[in-house]
Image: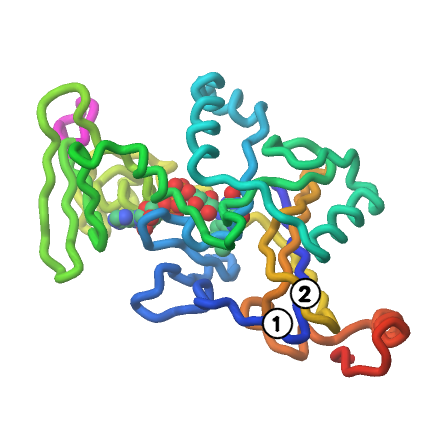
Amino acid sequence: MNSWIPVGAAASTAPTLDPPVLTDTSPDSFSQAFISEDGVPNNRARVLGGGTAINVGFYSRAQPLFIRQLGLDEALVEDSYKWVERKLVYRPNLLQWQSAVRNGLPEAGVLPYNGFTYHHINGTKIGGTILDRNGYRHTAADLLEYADPKRIKVYVHAVVNKIMFTAQDGSKPKAQGVIFYDARGERHTVLLKNGWRSEIILAAAAIGSPQLLLLSGIGPTSQLEPLGIEVVRNKTMVGQGMGDPPSNGLVIPSPLPIELALATTVGITKFGSYIESACGYDFTALYGSASQTRTLPKNVTASFTKVYGNKDFGQ
Ligand SMILES: Cc1cc2nc3c(=O)[nH]c(=O)nc-3n(C[C@H](O)[C@H](O)[C@H](O)COP(=O)(O)OP(=O)(O)OC[C@H]3O[C@@H](n4cnc5c(N)ncnc54)[C@H](O)[C@@H]3O)c2cc1C
């Protein structure tokens, strides 16, 4: 399992996340905070654009080996990358902290230095970002610009509750429609048109997709029957095998204001762990209380004091 090691530098006059998306637990928040069964705090998006509307915005292509192992058409994947990159991805502007991380990781042995690249390769690199030069976030919803407005309808505030399947007599089930609820709680049914180009694509993410399959009767009989869900197909692995990739956070309080930046410089180690760095936020909102995040080792405080004079560095 890969581990993810975010490194953060918080400014002493750190701005709070505005809007505080990940910590906003109000019913209207487009991020839903939850704690996994392993006790790991997490968030999932409930908004058009999905995770790209709440995530750290770092963009990278997958490792070619991963694409091959999935058995995907490599040429089509390559075209798809370019299709997405044209609308969403930018080269980040590196300021002080991100530049320091770019210089520091190779010094710490995360080699080679690969410069700016979308490719997933071992070493230190500057990746793409979905935040443009003005700090404006571009999300997967921007890809709708490719669509023909006359031939597409997008429903927002529409929560799908069930996929309806034909053939419950042992033959291969075929999705034929969905049931969804609108913002007023009204129930709607949408059915496929006849024809091979009419299809249902399930893309409700790692938790939502198996959840919808289970609600629709595709999953382990032993779980569905006690809940009164009619079994369409006994699929024992649906909803199983989810895991949390472990991550460790290191928060460094900065005595001086520091640029606001999400992950742009990353280290991909040969051990399979990733190092990312964000800066300029008040990370206490995400990572815990001030006492946990402001205590500096004596030697670090001594170095800061040498450079910046005798200030309160949270020791
Ligand atoms: C805090 C955070 C930071 C991250 N940072 C990065 C990063 O920097 N770089 C990176 O590459 N990845 C990052 N990720 C991961 C990345 O965002 C996700 O892997 C990616 O968005 C998953 O895409 P998806 O299309 O599978 O699902 P999603 O983007 O989650 O899309 C699923 C969509 O389905 C909708 N949905 C779910 N259930 C239903 C339902 N029943 N009815 C109707 N709609 C439904 C949701 O509202 C959502 O819009 C981060 C994730 C988080 C949470």
Where residue 299 appears, as percent x and y from the top left, is: 88, 71
**Disc 1 packing (10 Å; few <14; some 14–19; many ≥20):** many
Q: Are marks 1 and 2 in contact (CB under 8 Å)?
A: yes
Q: What amino acid is at disc 2?
A: Ile
Where the C terminus falls, by quadrant?
Answer: bottom right
Task: Read off the residue under disc 1.
Answer: 14
Secondary structure of residue under mark 1: loop
| Residue 236, percent from left and from top | 35, 36
Q: Is residue 122 above or below residue 44?
A: above
Q: Identify the mark nearer the N-term, 1 or 2.
A: 1
Q: Secondary structure at mark 2?
A: loop
Instruction: Name the magenta segment's main secondary structure.
Output: loop
Please name the residue shown 63% across and 33% down the image: 117
The vertical placement of 205 against 171, above or below, is: below
Residue 143, x across and y down, in percent: 35, 38
Nearest to the observer: residue 205 or residue 29: 29
- Judge from the rendering whether residue 256 lies leftward or rightward of residue 35; answer left or right: right
Compared with 252, 311 (above or below) is below
Task: Give the residue drawn at x 31%, y 33%.
Answer: 146
| Quadrant (top left/top right/bottom left/bottom right) for the N terminus | top right
- Nearer-the-camera pick, 264 or 295: 264
Residue range (magenta): 165-175
The reply, left or right, for residue 3 in relation to residue 73 is right
Whole-angstrom CA distance, mark 1 to mark 2, is 8 Å
Q: Residue at x 57, y 71 (%)?
A: 15
Q: Does residue 205 show up magenta in the picture?
A: no
Instruction: Return the residue at label 2.
Output: 258
In the image, residue 199 lies at what x, y percent?
20, 28
Q: Quick check: is the Cβ at mark 2 less than 8 Å away from ligand 1?
A: no
Q: How was the colour assigned to the protein in this rendering? A: rainbow
Residue 4 seen in the figure:
yes
